[in-house]
Amino acid sequence: MNIRIEKASVLKQKPEAGIELGFGNYFTDHMFIADYEEGKGWHDLRIVPYQPLTLDPSVQVFHYAQEVFEGLKAYKSEDNRTLLFRPDQNAARMKASCARVCLPEVPEDMFVEAVSALVKLEEDWIPKEKGTSLYIRPFVIATDSFLGIRIPKKASFIIILSPVGNYYPEGLNPVKIWVEDEYVRAVRGGTGAAKVGGNYAASLLATKIAHEAGFTQVLWLDGQERKYIEEVGSMNIFFKINGTIIAPALNGTILPGITRKSCLELIRSWGMPVEERRLSLDEVIEAAENGTLEEIWGSGTAAVISPVGMIHCRGKNYTVQDGGIGEVSQKLYDAITGIQQGRMEGPEGWVREL
Ligand SMILES: *Cc1c(COP(=O)(O)O)cnc(C)c1O
């Protein structure tokens, strides 16, 4: 694979060590772009200085939202190796997301090579403080300038990088979530299982309501009956009830998280009881009321593991784990971040060293 590299002549000032990076505020010196055209395929793979895009106002993504994205992270280990966490999984998911919205699929090897080449070039941007990493945001947009609705004939695959700290200002501290029983995120047959920007546009109103009420994220229920637990804003969700860990089963409306999958693989390897199944809100509330609701946590690349200290539903607040961090949440956080940062040996193939 031939990637042309055009280096920036002036490099940016990197954020000072120790500064609160937050999430998605800073961008590195370079970005990756590849273009697609029907008949020609993906071409002109290049790494260029980070810069604004010039697009015709009629390009399809602006009007019909043909956009898919991914999120993964690069880490520096203590012995200064540059590590990626399961990039093959993101490559496979992006391909599936593209297929769902009729964008040209990015070949998996092109995805992994492009991510690797860009991160390698920007290695010095990987922050080293505890809880920090280099967030990688690959995305595909439809770039035909044409106002009719059709399957795109042109697209761009772009990757940008952002040094990040904690996703939530709370860090590993527990978040408060709002159970949304009016608006829904996804319906059967829709795009819930694809990582498309449009899903987030549809989710913002409920998130605004939750924020105004003092909650960090929305817990979505199923779109048909508003009865079963699906996932949290940008995370999958796990419950521990009476000693058993329960993850809502992937049913076509839930985003198949790579952190979720990794949690399940670890939990199974530790021999803890775990079920992937339909889980109703009523079952969770009953467990909260009879004292068997032991833990709730969210999983996602951005926050890794996010313990949930309180849920709000139907006008009532339920405190979980006395508002603290549960044992399994902590164990998963330590294991996954340990593997990601090269302090611990993970299962075969989880870490790709650049
Ligand atoms: C990206 C995402 C997740 C988490 O997936 P990871 O691969 O673990 O980062 C969960 N839910 C939604 C809606 C997402 O967009």
Image: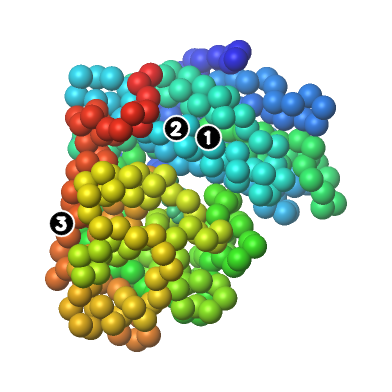
Q: Which residue is mark 3?
A: 327
Amino acid type, callout 3 = Glu
First in residue order: circle 3 vs circle 2: 2
Density class for disc 3 (Cα within 10 Å; few <14, some 14-19, many ≥20) is few
Q: Secondary structure at mark 1?
A: helix
Quadrant for the C terminus, please: top left
Residue 249 in picture, x, y percent from top left: 44, 60
Q: Secondary structure at mark 3?
A: helix
Disc 3 from disc 2: Cα separation: 28 Å
Q: Out of 111 and 118, give the one closest to the viewer.
A: 111
Residue for point 54% across, 37% down: 92
Residue 218 in picture, x, y percent from top left: 41, 68
The reply to whether residue 48 is in sight is no
**The label number, if any, that marks residue 67 in the structure image:** none
Q: Is residue 28 above or below residue 152?
A: above
Disc 1 from disc 3: Cα separation: 32 Å
Amino acid type, callout 1 = Ala
Quadrant for the N terminus, please: top right
Q: Which residue is mark 2?
A: 87
Q: Which residue is mark 1?
A: 91
Residue 78 in picture, x, y percent from top left: 19, 24
Q: Out of 40 and 91, give the one closest to the viewer.
A: 91
